[in-house]
Image (cartoon, rainbow, N blue to C red):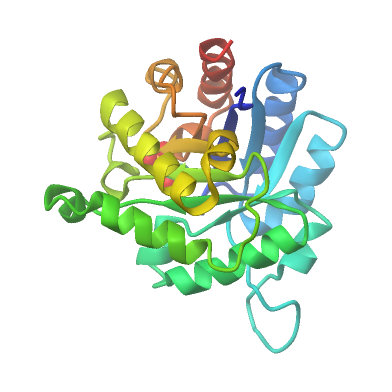
Amino acid sequence: MARTPIIGGNWKLNLGRTPARDLLTALRASLDGIAGVEVVVCPPAPWLGDAADILRGSSIGVGAQNVYWQPQGAFTGEVSAALLAGVVDYVIVGHSERRHVFHETAEETNKKLQTVLGLGMQPFFAVGELREERESGRTNDVLKRQLLVGFTDIEPLPEGFVVAYEPVWAIGTGLTATPEIAQQTCADIRAIVAGRYGEATAEACRIQYGGSANAENAGNLMSQPDIDGLLVGGAALQAESFTAICKAAAAATV
Ligand code: 13P
């Protein structure tokens, strides 16, 4: 089954308005029309409108980094999926920084996923284990809980749904998971999806790897059979490296 590879650039809390606009303009020039890979950029929330304007009519999608499940009301500082839906097509849900820095629970992640899917947007559903969880052999249990709680009441899972496997120990550390570890864990994730939704849905599910992905390791990671994309942090902040990653992904999967 052919799965369209998908590369996301998660800018996190980086880049002021002018450098953000410059990067968006440069990416439009270098990546618009790229074949064989879906490309999405996720700038900080205040620049989502700029991103949508600059990338309108291009093949590059725009995503938000977070969302709140309530549609409106007295929720100071939050941004609802309903508001985002007019601006973006993708939303990162359950990023480890949301889980560990902001203490977001798997149950909250589930509410966000339901809301995003309900409005027809594509989530990047991020899961991943801590270093001590991997070292004590608990990776599969941790991922299973994050995935199954996240999937509560989501029926069916839309075709082409995106799970982002981001081992916390590899994020921003330069310690990229080896292609073998990333492949094995993405295969384990696909098996968990198959257990929940069946083989056909699992085969259609796209699983990204994230954690110190860069222009040098992208091709090797993308050539693994269960890795269908990358969620890129630091290396998404420069047009040159993000463009090289997207091109390596397109080349690795033809
Ligand atoms: P880095 O690529 O900077 O390790 O970040 C990965 C990540 O968290 C993407 O969401």
Q: Residue furthest left?
A: 136
**Looking at the picture, does residue 178 appear above or below residue 237?**
above
Image quadrant holding the N terminus, namely: top right
Q: Quadrant of residue 80?
A: bottom right
Q: Is residue 11 left or right of residue 114?
A: left
Would residue 253 be seen by someone viewing this image from the given angle? Answer: yes
- Location of ligand 1 given as a quarter of the image: top left
Q: In which quarter of the image is residue 114?
A: bottom right
Would residue 19 be seen by someone viewing this image from the given angle? Answer: no
Residue at the (64%, 26%) spot, across then down: 4
Q: Is residue 114 left or right of residue 196?
A: right
**Looking at the picture, does residue 230 appear above or below residue 93?**
above
Q: In this view, does 219 lie to the left or right of 25?
A: left
Q: In this view, does 194 lie to the left or right of 212?
A: right
Of 73 and 201, the residue lying toward us: 201
Of 152 and 206, the residue lying toward us: 152
Q: In which quarter of the image is residue 10?
A: top right
Q: Residue furthest right?
A: 57
Q: Where in the figure is residue 184, as x and y percent of width and height?
A: 31, 32
Q: Which residue lies furthest to the bottom in this view?
A: 74
**Looking at the picture, does residue 89 appear above or below residue 214?**
below
Query: What is the count of numbered marks?
Result: 0
Residue at the (13%, 48%) spot, across then down: 135
Image quadrant holding the C terminus, namely: top right
Of 131 and 136, the residue lying toward us: 136
Residue at the (39%, 73%) spot, across then down: 103
Q: Where in the figure is residue 146, as x and y percent of width and height?
A: 40, 60
Residue at the (52%, 39%) spot, across then down: 199
Q: Where in the figure is residue 35, as x and y percent of width and height?
A: 71, 16
